Image (cartoon, rainbow, N blue to C red):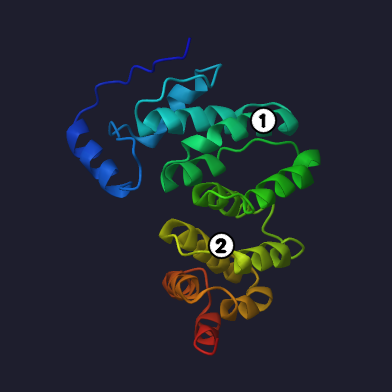
Amino acid sequence: MAIKIEYPLLPDRDRKKAFMDSLIPESPLKSLGIPMPVCRDIAKNLSSDDIEIRYIEDVLIKAIVIFSRKEAFCEKKKRIETLLSYLVSWMVTDVVSSSLFYRKEEKQEVFSYFFSLMDRKEDMTKRLGIVALMDRDFLTPENLPAVLEKICTLDCSAYLLSMAAAWYVATAYTYFADLTAPYFSRVDPATKRRAMQKCRDSRRISRENKERLKRL
């Protein structure tokens, strides 16, 4: 039987719920206004990801349980496949990526799997692939060209996918400006504009590299 999570009655929950719902207008599931640290604490105490899905927090907790489980990645990716249909919001893709557990010897397998998600049909599945590959373990000079080439081929007409692509390009430029700069002219115009804005807003990018953006 699926686990029905009973959430605590936290103070000011209605205001938090309204705020959370305003952040995820694309989601068919509403929020209960439960803070992420509470969701993570609940996930830590669950041994199963078979959770009854009623709210966005249920999906977040299910995803955290799957991503953080200490098991071989060949098994974990089977569980991730069952999660893909629940990627109803950017919040899910972005939160779970930071929870991913894998062993060092599985690094290439993990990279290949999330890279392959960019070939899927669903925009949110593609977004998960992009966001997961922004992990510093994968954001390397060896991997960047392949990921950036793939991003250049994507149809990023969907806003949330374009934002993920722009986030990746801007993050890549932060660490590897020389490698990344040529790709600004190859991504679609909307993604380029968003990536450049993220770079201009970043405090981690030097003034010199921000000036360089004006020439791209």
Query: Which residue is rendered at x = 70% and y = 45% of the image?
Result: 113
Q: Which residue, as the protein is rendered here, is positioned at the far front?
A: 121
The quadrant the C terminus occupies is: bottom right
Q: Which mark is residue 78?
A: 1
What kind of residue is marked 1? Lys
Picture layout, residue 212 above or below residue 162: below
Q: Residues within 10 Å of mark 2 (few under 14, many from 20)?
A: many
Q: Name the secondary structure under disc 2.
A: helix
Picture layout, residue 118 above or below residue 75: below
Q: Position of residue 15 (x, y in %)?
A: 18, 38
Q: Which residue, as the protein is rendered here, is positioned at the far bottom?
A: 215
Q: Is residue 12 visible?
A: no
Query: Which residue is rendered at x = 38% and y = 18% of the image?
Result: 5
Q: Which residue has dot 2 on it?
A: 168
Q: Position of residue 183 (x, y in %)?
A: 62, 76
Q: Position of residue 32 (x, y in %)?
A: 28, 31
Pick whichever, 189 or 202, lies toward us.
189
Q: Is residue 184 left or right of residue 10?
A: right
Point out the tag, 1 or 2, that comes first from the N-terminus: 1
